[in-house]
Amino acid sequence: MSFSYSKESIEELRSQIDIVDVIGRVVQLKRAGANFKGLCPFHNEKTPSFVVSPQKQIFTCFGCGASGDLLGFVKRYYNLDFSEAVEKLAGEYGINIQKNVYNDDREKYYEINREAARFFYRSMTESANAGYTYMKGRQIEDATIAKFGLGYADEKWDSLYCYFQEKGTDEKLLLELGLIAEKGGRYYDKFRNRVMFPIINTSGRVIGFGGRALESAAAPKYLNSPENRVFQKKNNLYALNLTRQDIGKEGSAIIVEGYMDVISLYQAGVKNVAASLGTALTDNQAKLISRYTKNVVLSYDADAAGQKAALRGIEVLRGQDCRIRVLHVTDGKDPDEYIKKNGREAFVKLAAEAMPYVDYKLEAAKRDLDMNSEEGKLDYMKRIKPVLNELSPVEADLYIKKIAREVGIAEGAIKLEISGNTKSTRPVSAERKADGQQDGLSATEATVLKCLLTEPPLTEDILAAENIFGCQLARRVADIIFELYGTKGDFDLAQINDLLEPAESEKLAAALDNVVIAGKADEVLTECLQNNTLRLLREREKRVLDLLSLADEEANADSARELTLELMEIQREMKAHGGKKHVK
């Protein structure tokens, strides 16, 4: 069984609980005019810059930039997801929360994966085996094996299959989960003679496995569960179920490539770590990380693939407004080998000295160029132009001075090369109600999806405008569309429904039935995208106005000036898009 919270219940929760009372339990607040002030709980400070507004029921810190509403504070302070924050507040204040319960037959998939994980763990720990010998050779302790639930798939062809056959488990389900395979009408274990790494989501459910081949096992070196109803690599990070509290406590996350990197770092005491499931970090993984911290250190291999993954990861994380640094361990070693050789303190020092992402991109631009030649310098200028264009004017000016010194090109020439365009182009995330828990598709969301179903190639036009989808169902449908279009170049409603729950398909059909596209789909989509841009600007305008109302004291004069300039820029953009200025 699964559930969602009704919109009315969330609004009732917000209306009955005072944000000042909740925050006042953990932060010493003092009245400051119409607001309350205190020391920020999210960063170290000696002078209070953390402001809570009882009138607007929001908080903001003018020191570190943290801001949000009641649920946003509880999620961030206690490192909880949306559902956990709702349950915590409802329980503490005695409020009954209405849940919309619906059947979810994915439970049987979770149960099978859990049984398989137990089977592999017993194989690893209850008798001598090659997997245990291998892990001991990698200096992994018994306590760590237990903590991560590491297992062993023996070399026999049907050990796991026979185990599930005795339990009467349907072979079809085992095939879907990738635990067994079939050939010529005969079933056999997919994982054989491998160390098994169970992949567990933040809800504590086993969703898949990674298997590392031992010497006598067949290729490939790593074999992972296939994508299925409960396992999508792009939506999960390895070990985040264990490390999310440590990530929140440390205020930063170290993202590595491999299972063993995570395990060795964790065992050595570096616990604010997780691994991307695959080389490239995805948008959904970045969103998941940003729930716990905005400070991210990427620690990928120093080879060409690792460098490419780091550059891709930077862009994905910037989309979530993360502060990114890049770490390449010395001598081309991976984190697993480095920490075993040098210890925790050395790795922590290395992470603290990780390169800011702009410096990393500028260094990456020099690769394969002869920086002593005129041609090399000209090619370098062309490569770094988009990097500098992404920066604020102050940041760009600082880096231009640095580049001029290093490369021997006049500052004025560099500024001329980038056409003086140093305005930030970073995407601004839309502020969504209740963390995506709103009910049903909006008219705009339904219209956009109808346009895409009418003309699938229009999918390319919205790749840069994912924030147009706010509700959970719309985002899920969009993710399916992106995946189908990316792999097949086409899609239809039937293919989408195959990947949705029955209740989701019904909601989608009802929303689409209410949409009539009067005109060409591309023209309708363009209008929707323009309206979405205006909506985002209005949301930014409201947020800045709210912050201005909290920053009207002398102590926040600098912040007030910056916010006023930002407000003027927003309102100029709104006017350019046909919108009106905010009227109080």
Image (tube, helix red, strand yellow):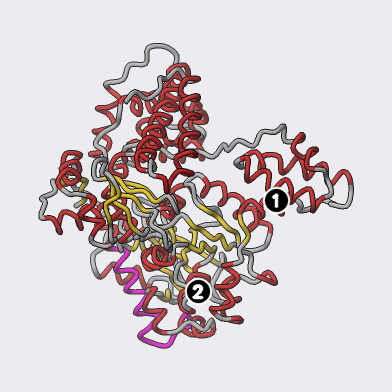
Please, what secondary structure does the residue beneath circle 1 have?
helix
Please tell me which residue lies in front, 575 or 192: 575
Residue type for callout 2: Leu
Main SS of residues in magenta: helix
Q: Position of residue 217 (x, y in %)?
A: 54, 73
Q: Can residue 142 be spotted in the picture?
A: yes
573 lies above or below 192? above
Residue for point 23% across, 50% down: 19
Which quadrant would residue 390 be assigned to in this image? top right
**Magenta residues (range):** 112-131
Residue 200 x/y as whole percent: 36, 63
Q: Is disc 2 placed on a helix, strand or loop?
A: helix
Q: Which residue is mark 1?
A: 362
Check the image and name the residue furthest to the top.
Answer: 519
Looking at the figure, which quarter contains the C terminus? top left
Tag count: 2
Residue 272 left/right relative to 89 = right
Q: What residue sits 45% from the left and 14% below the top?
A: 520
Circle 2 sits on which residue? 265
Please rate how many residues cluster around mark 2, counting C-alpha atoms within 10 Å: few if below 14, some from 14 to 19, many from 20: many
- Residue 51 vs 225, above or below: the answer is above
- Outermost right residue: 373
